Amino acid sequence: MDIHSKKLEKALIFETNRTDVPPTTSAFFLGLGFDTVTLEFWVPLKKSQVFTDGCKDFFEKGKTTRREIAGVVGQLMWWDPAIFNMKMLSRALQQLTGGIDGAQLWDEEVQFSQLVLRELQYH
């Protein structure tokens, strides 16, 4: 480091030789875990369990509101880096939201098709 960098470092109060923080190759960012060595993402167990329980409830009811479906689809899109091909595996759910051109009566209950029920079982 040159003298200018050391002065700037001191002015900004950076510490470079900390021993209380161990090096790591994994962390959480925006709710997803990631590993910089294996280049993998994962969904934390607690979050995936809550999601699985919600899908089970939807499956048992056989219907829910477009708003709740949009929440599930949003969660799946957010998890796409961790769950390969998630966008393809949730197409029937996505269609139930009404899409851009469809009806967007968010609090209307929608009956699930057999394809949606299969997708819910997968998740």
Image (cartoon, rainbow, N blue to C red):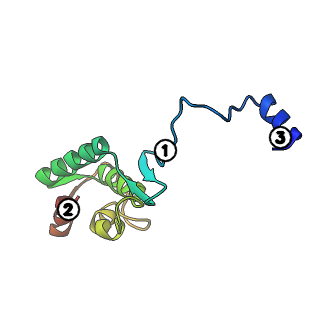
Which amino acid type corresponds to the residue marked 3 in the rendered image? Ser
Residue pointed to by mark 3: 5
Return the residue found at the far left. 60
Q: Is mark 3 on a helix, strand or loop?
A: helix
Mark 3 is surrounded, within 10 Å at the Cα level, by few (under 14), some (14 to 19) or many (20 or more) other residues, namely: few
Indicate which label's residue lies in the foreground, 3 or 2: 3
Circle count: 3
8 or 97, which lies in front?
8
- Labelled disc at residue 122: 2
Look at 30% across and 65% down and name the residue there: 90
The mark lying in front, picked from 1 and 2, is 1
| Of pointers 1 and 2, the one earlier in the residue sequence | 1
In this rendering, position of residue 10 left or right of residue 97: right
For the residue labelled by badge 1, is the local secondary structure a helix, a strand or a loop?
loop
Q: Distance between the residues labelled 1 and 2?
A: 33 Å
Question: In screen coordinates, is 2 left or right of 96?
Answer: right
Residue indicated by mark 1: 24
The residues tagged by marks 3 and 1 sit, at their Cα atoms, a distance apart of 25 Å
